[in-house]
Structure formats: structure tokens, C-alpha cells
Amino acid sequence: MLEWLNGAVAKEPAPAPDLMAVRLVLAAVLGAAVAGVYALTRKKSRSEAAPFFATLVLLTVLIALVTQVIGDSAARAFSLVGALSIVRFRTVVDDTRDTAFVIFAVAVGMAVGAGFLWLALVGIPVVGLTAAVLSAWGGTGGVAQPARLVVRLANGTDPQGVLAAAFDKHLREVKFQAADTAKQGAAVDYTYLVRPKPGVAPVGLIGELNRIDGVQSVEWREPG
């Protein structure tokens, strides 16, 4: 039955089932290693890191699976690209370094799925050591990481005109990061990377923003 499925559906030789299973298990193990590097170098709390940790492990396994599905078929590769293009991720990435770890997981998954296990085994310690060095260097620079501020405004409200005064009063640095619709288009979430002025507590800014007409909610996240 299994041979019939491999021949009639795939129309080409497929990796042995035991080999495919071993590759997926290895992908899960190495994905956990990638996530471990992330957890050790990003210095986030367990609750904050857990969702992204799980994402890295699952992504590594899924990429290994997709790589085996594609094989050497260019047509299948283009078909998968078209099918996966409908997926849209709307989560704002807090730090661009998180994107690097996503690419890291993808590369490891592709290496395992294509049978280049040695490449993954060499790449993980090299990237891990590099990430650790950069983390230590960034942690001793004396420059605090920016906090993330998300302000939800009614759709049609000018964020610059509404928020500028409060920002000038409480913040020494403001960098716009993203805008995303909420409540089915009735509101817009504006995300900023911010650093408060010396001696200014976030609670003061949050309270002042909540008193502004048009502001529906305010979220402040300390850097990880």
C-alpha cells in the first residue's frame, strides 16, 4: 500500500519512511538547540521567550518536512511558494535580532531536510557563539534597550497631532515602528520604540495618553 502511494501519487522515488522520520526527529532536536541559543542570548523571562521558543522548534521541523516534499522538483517548489504565499503574519517583531533567529531555524530545517546534517551541526555552534559574543558586547555597552509602546487610536485620528505633546513631555527618543488595523478597521495600533526621559516613569505617560480623546488603549512593554 505504501509503495503504491509513493509511486501513484508522488510519481517519483521518495525517501524511505524511516529516513524521513529520522530527519524530522533530528530537526526537532536541532530546532530545540536553535531555540536554546535564542533563550540564552536574548535574556528574556521564561514566559516571554516561550512562544517564540516553540515557534523556532516547530518552524525547523516544518521546514525540514517541506524540504523533503520539494525534493529536486522545481515545479513542486513553485507550487508550494504559491500555496504558502496566502499566509500573512501580522505580529510586530520586537527586535530585528528575532528575525535572524527565524532565518537560523529555516536554514537548519532546510539542511536537515536536504540531508546535510553536518552543515546544521557545524552551523549551530558557530551561530550560537557569534550570538553569545554579540549579546555580551551589546549588554556591556551601557545603552538601555528601547521599550515598546503601542497606542490604539480611533481610525482617522492623526497620531502625530494627538500624541506629540505627551511624547515631547515624557520621552527623550521616539521611533515609529509599525501601524496595524484593529477592531475590524475601526482602530489603528501604532507601535513605537521609545526611551523615557531621566526620572520619568512610564505610568505618567500612560496616564496622560489615556486621557487624550481618540486614544482607546495604551500598552507599554519593557525591553527583554
Image (spheres, grey):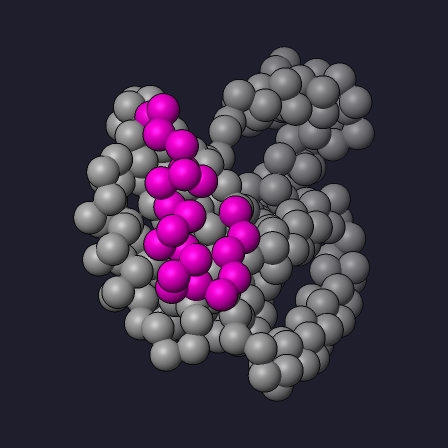
- Seen in the picture, residue 160 relative to 78 is either above or below; the reply is below
Total residue callouts:
0
Say which of 15 and 127 sits in front: 127
47 up-or-down from 112: above or below: below
| Relative to 157, 25 lies left or right | right
Q: In this rendering, is residue 181 above or below 102?
A: above
Tell me residue 142's x, y (percent): 59, 83
The location of residue 192, given as percent across then percent down, is 46, 51
**Can residue 218 be spotted in the picture?**
yes
To which quarter of the image does residue 141 belong?
bottom right
Residue occupying image coordinates x 67% and y 71% = 131
Name the spot of residue 115 as percent of width and height, x first.
Answer: 75, 49
Asked whether residue 159 is drawn in magenta, I would say yes
Decide if residue 109 is in sight here.
Answer: no
Magenta range is: 155-176
Residue 28 lies in the magenta stretch: no
Residue ID at (25%, 35%):
214
Task: Name the quadrant containing residue 118.
Answer: bottom right
Position of 104 relative to 215 (above/below): below
In this rendering, position of residue 180 left or right of residue 17: left
Report the quarter where the C terminus lies: bottom left
Residue in the image at 59% along x and 63% along y:
34
Q: Residue at x 37, y 79 (%)?
A: 199
Q: Nearer the viewer, residue 128 or 41?
A: 41
